[in-house]
Image (cartoon, rainbow, N blue to C red):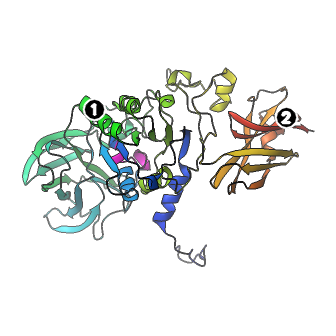
Amino acid sequence: VLEGAPAVVADPPAPIDGQALARELAARGFVLVRNEGALPLDAAAGGTVALSGAAARDARILGGGSATVFPERLIAPLDGLTAALPEGALTYSVGADPSDELTAAGQGFELHAVCRDASGAVLGEGGLPSGQVQWIGDDLPTGVTYETMASIEVRGTFVPRESGEHAFGTRGLGAFALAVGGETLWSGVQEMGNEADPFEAFFGAPNERARLTLTEGEPVEVSLTFQVPDMSALPLRAIMFSLLHLGPRRDADELIAEAVAAAREADTAVVVVATTERVESEGFDRQDLALPGRQDDLVRAVAAVNPNTVVVVNVGSPVELPWRGDVAAVLLAWFPGQEGGAALADVLLGDAEPGGRLPTTWPARFADAPVTEVVPTDGRLEYREGLFIGYRAYEKHGVTPGYPFGHGLGYTDWTYDSLEVTADTVRVRLTNTGARPGREVVQVYLAPERDAVERPASWLAAFGSVVAGPGESVETEIALPARAFEIWDEEARGWRRIGGTYEVRASHSHGDTRLTATLDLA
């Protein structure tokens, strides 16, 4: 509240159930791109589920870099399905781990930060949801200031989930001391290197510092002390460093074999695949669209022994899915947030319908993507594609995508009954012909009959959604914005309306037109 300024909101909004809202939003964002009768699962029938994938246990719920926030709790797919399925119905195996690099200490760690002055006196303490410290500006524990703070100790306990050799490390720039079990395993200074990633150049790359053999279930004390540098001359003061961990490394073929054995005995196999922060994050371009590690091998092996294989894709943007035609269902979960695992259970078991539609076009393979040149030459990057990006580029080049823009399936079926069009309105009538209630997103595309100007062959003009029960017919009226018929006139420095004959398409996706009508625009 600014002193002397009137409140913008006189009355605060009513309180909401944040966890329930996050769960609902996650389910609404999931995109079901393939379903050969595998979903939703019938929990009442007493079927068994074999879950695999490292991301099923340690979910990636948000993007890297500036997208990093710290939720109050995290529900992974394993957590959500364990809570939703009857006891004994679910088994879990790692199957394949997309990363063999250290990440911020998470599962099994209970940590907090202790801030001290130069004499060693404690200034303040704060809880940590992981081994990552990310304090920017005045976001410091109570009683702590940059002027008085000399060191920060991340300390607590770690209860290993597996017996074997555990690796510990650091990320950040400056002087550190790492101790496990009361013994200092490493101390030293990490300086700025020549990393290509600007974030790594500034914050430091992950570095392994020590390995220690630990026993499953036996707690051990951990501590990472960081010496705070003088930041008085910096325009924005921030502290970012991490205590890192990596569990015991196991043979990849052995992990896949365990998942295959479990999948062979189950009614349904659910495989969660994912990218990692080293593959998909802020500050660098991706080199390809492949899933990291042996995840593709895991999916193929599981699908070979269980025809009811469902793959959950935990990524932030398109990846290649070379096995997509060999599995029963593919569900894109994106980075679903803290309640993602609970929302996933809702969708898999049919308590919620996957509500999302593709906001991007997914190529069948990276080589099919029309626009892949993203590296400047001599400091210059030409945008030669012009208007023809995304689905417009696929259409121009005659390339069939793996999954088209706007694609997404629900748990019921729809017929498009009628289409009425005016210059500013589209009216569509639909019927839910399935056995369940559902929601359909009606997408309206425009395609000019002929063009004297350079434009895509078709483009999304507007969309709307309808909800209906089994057998119910509904109607939606969707406004056609004037901007949908305009192009930018560089000479006039403004938008110019282009008249003529347009085909108006009422579609389920860019690749699935259900009804068409002709509009003559003056």
Mark 1 neighbour density, 10 Å: few (under 14) some (14–19) many (20 or more) = some
User: What x and y, as percent, mark residue 238?
Assistant: 34, 54
Closer to viewer: mark 2 or mark 1: 1
At 83% from the left and 34% from the top, the residue drawn is 503
User: What x and y, as percent, mark residue 213?
Assistant: 10, 43
User: What x and y, as percent, mark residue 111?
Assistant: 23, 59
Residue segment shown in magenta: 55-67
327 left or right of 420 in image: left
**Circle 1 SS class:** helix
User: What x and y, as percent, mark residue 192?
Assistant: 27, 38
Q: Which residue is mark 2?
A: 502
| Residue that extends furthest to the front in the rendered view of this protein | 45
Q: Is residue 332 above or below residue 252?
A: below
At 73% from the left and 40% from the top, the residue drawn is 507
Mark 1 is on which residue type? Ala
Residue 97 in sight in this render: no
In the foreground, 502 or 174: 502
What is the CA distance from the residue labelled 2 to the residue labelled 1?
56 Å
Q: Which residue is mark 1?
A: 257
**Circle 2 SS class:** strand
In the foreground, 383 or 144: 383
At 85% from the left and 34% from the top, the residue drawn is 502
Kindly indicate the quadrant of the structure image that contains residue 416. Answer: top right
Mark 2 is on which residue type? Tyr
**Is residue 59 inside the magenta stretch?**
yes
Disc with the residue nearer the chain's start (2 vs 1): 1
Q: Are marks 2 and 1 in contact (CB under 8 Å)?
A: no
Quarter of the picture holding the C terminus = top right
Residue 482 in sight in this render: yes
**Is residue 224 inside the magenta stretch?**
no
Q: Is residue 191 above or below residue 67?
A: above
